[in-house]
Amino acid sequence: MKKLISLSILFSCYICFSQSTPENSQLFKTKIKANVTINDSINLDEFRGIALIPGGHFRKELEKINYFSKIMTEKELKKEIKEAGLDPAKFNFDSKEGIENVFKNYKKFIYVFQSIRNEDRNMQLIVITVPLGKRVFEVEGKQKTNVIGISAGTKYLPEDLNNAMLNELVDYIRRNSKTYK
């Protein structure tokens, strides 16, 4: 009987302490961690309407995060503006004033994009609010190489690095949104 009681206590402790909380659970599988370099607090829910993704990168990943109402490229947003009957000369992405008009008079949006600096093989995932042009979140990771014998190979796959940066983005959304679960 004592063994049964001690086993049940041990099992219940295991269940209680091994559960992951939303704050520390990863949405994207990876064993590495990325480095957050900019982490400004904003009310992210104000920009939830549209995530603008230049070139269409991160569409699948942002859909998996399931936070933004719409995920669009600039081309898709321009088409939507045209279909809404708005003046393309006033609502455009060719000038700062045009971007401000879209942002203030049509829909608020936030840029989510990745840039790669080839000189040091750093990768960055950056979120920028527009029209301010101010970076509110930036995470970077570096592709590391491991030399084995004569050949050199990558130690971490870029997908792992990408996933690590995306997990940091998810954590940023969790901290700066009252509606994200």
Image (spheres, rainbow, N blue to C red):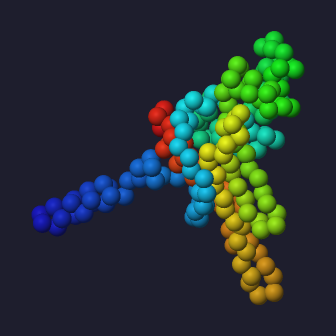
| Image quarter (top left, top right, bottom left or bottom right) of the N terminus | bottom left
In the rendered structure, the answer to whether residue 85 lies left or right of residue 35 reads right
Residue 118: image x %, image y %?
A: 82, 63
Left or right: 140 with respect to 175?
Answer: right
Please report the residue visible at 71 percent of the width from the left and 78 percent of the height from the top.
Answer: 146
What residue lies at 38% left-to-right and 53% top-to-bottom? 19
Q: Is residue 145 above or below residue 103?
A: below
Residue 142 placement (x, y as % from top left): 69, 66
Quadrant assignment, res 134? top right
**In the image, residue 105 above or below residue 2:** above
> In this view of the protein, which residue sits in the foreground, 152 or 33?
33
> In the picture provided, is 146 more to the left or to the right than 136?
right
Which residue is at 21% across, 60% downward?
9
Query: Residue 56: where, in percent of width, then height?
Result: 78, 40
For the question of whether residue 97 can be seen, the reply is: yes
Residue that appears at 67% across and 31% down: 109
